[in-house]
Image (tube, rainbow, N blue to C red):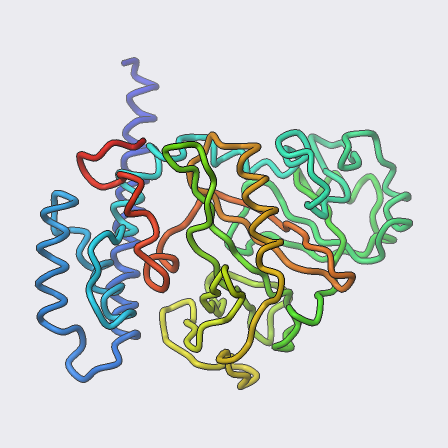
Amino acid sequence: MGVAASARSMIQRAMLERRVRRSLAEARAGLVRLSRRPGGLSSEFKRRAEAYSGDVFGTRQHAPWLHLYSECRGEFREGWLPVSYYFSEVLDRANGGYQHMARHRAANTALFGSDAFPDLAYCVNGRLMWADYTPCDPSELAGQAKDLVFKPDHSGFGRGIRFLSARDLDAARIARLGNGVLQPRLIPHDSFAQIDMPSLATLRIGTVVGHDGEVSVRTAYLKMGRKAESHVISASQVRVPVDWRTGLLAADGYLADWTPVTAHPDTGDSFAGRSLPGLDEFVEIVTSLHRKLPLARYLCWDLVRDASGRIRVLEWEGGVVSFAEATQGPCFADLGWARGQSNG
């Protein structure tokens, strides 16, 4: 291995170790906020989690996530996948570099060829083009949408999103935006506007490619923003599990720091009894899209139903497991992702 390659490998290992440490810190802090019982996690759950982590994952290092899952569900379940183990051992094997295609917004048309994405135009290397890659003049945008949302490449967690007026865009301003996608600012359907927030609530669905090549849903949850925010931001979002078979929301949701809530903290609207209709339509769209790009085993899709009733896929990314496992897991026990098991 050359000096440059060795240096890159060291940097990548250091970044991975830092990511694992940060995830474990999140689990420990979340457990404190999540605890519903005096004295915190029961000694039985703690003992079983630590033993399971050592036996299945080769070290007790990953037990904090199993502690959090246990406290969240009020029981210990075999088959859970700790986030720290997912980062350190599974993600690269399951998805490799293919999940990073999602960072390049203009690839949506080439990869999926689907009008499920509301992509209006792409800013790429100083050029503006329509979603079909034909040249676009900035003056033409106003004829398609009044208000636009710009999402830059290599962004995530709600960072970097900008809201723009189509009338104010010219070639110079387009160039300053950098690479990314322009989407119309959507008005949600009534089913997505049940809890009145300035930000657009989105449904996240996680899909997996199984050993047999079939695509299936493993998790679904509603992501909502806060009152003072223009869009959903990961660091402050409110998440509520959704049964993808029935569309029913769970009675309990969670703040970004794992504080449990039964109602939106800004409006007081409870989650119990609410539902998102037509979940089978959402499932059909995301599974068909994943079948077009089965190179990454686990992907997450953020969707919304707009005011016309049409389902739109706002973005996609490599799958995250923490909320899925804590609220609906074990979600991945059949995939052989634990230590020493085949990846299928």
Q: Residue at x 85, y 35 (%)?
A: 136
Say whether residue 166 is left or right of residue 299: right
Residue 263 higher or lower than 49, as above or below: below
Q: Report the quarter where the C terminus lies.
A: top left
Say whether residue 76 is left or right of residue 50: right
Q: Which residue lies furthest to the top in this view?
A: 2
Q: Which residue is drawn at 73% across and 38% down?
A: 122
* Total marks placed: 0
Nearer to us in this view, 105 or 249: 249
Say whether residue 135 is left or right of residue 156: right
Say whether residue 285 is left or right of residue 2: right
Residue 47 higher or lower than 115, as above or below: below
Q: Position of residue 125 (x, y in %)?
A: 69, 30
| Quarter of the rendering containing residue 247 | bottom right
| Quarter of the rendering containing residue 139 | top right
Residue 104 higher or lower than 30, as above or below: above
Q: Position of residue 195 (x, y in %)?
A: 61, 77
Nearer to us in this view, 342 or 182: 342
Q: Residue at x 68, y 60 (%)?
A: 305
Q: Where is residue 171 in the image (x, y as percent from the top left)?
A: 83, 39
Q: Where is residue 127 in the image (x, y as percent from the top left)?
A: 76, 32
Q: Which residue is drawn at 71% across and 57% down?
A: 163
Q: Report the quarter where the N terminus lies.
A: top left
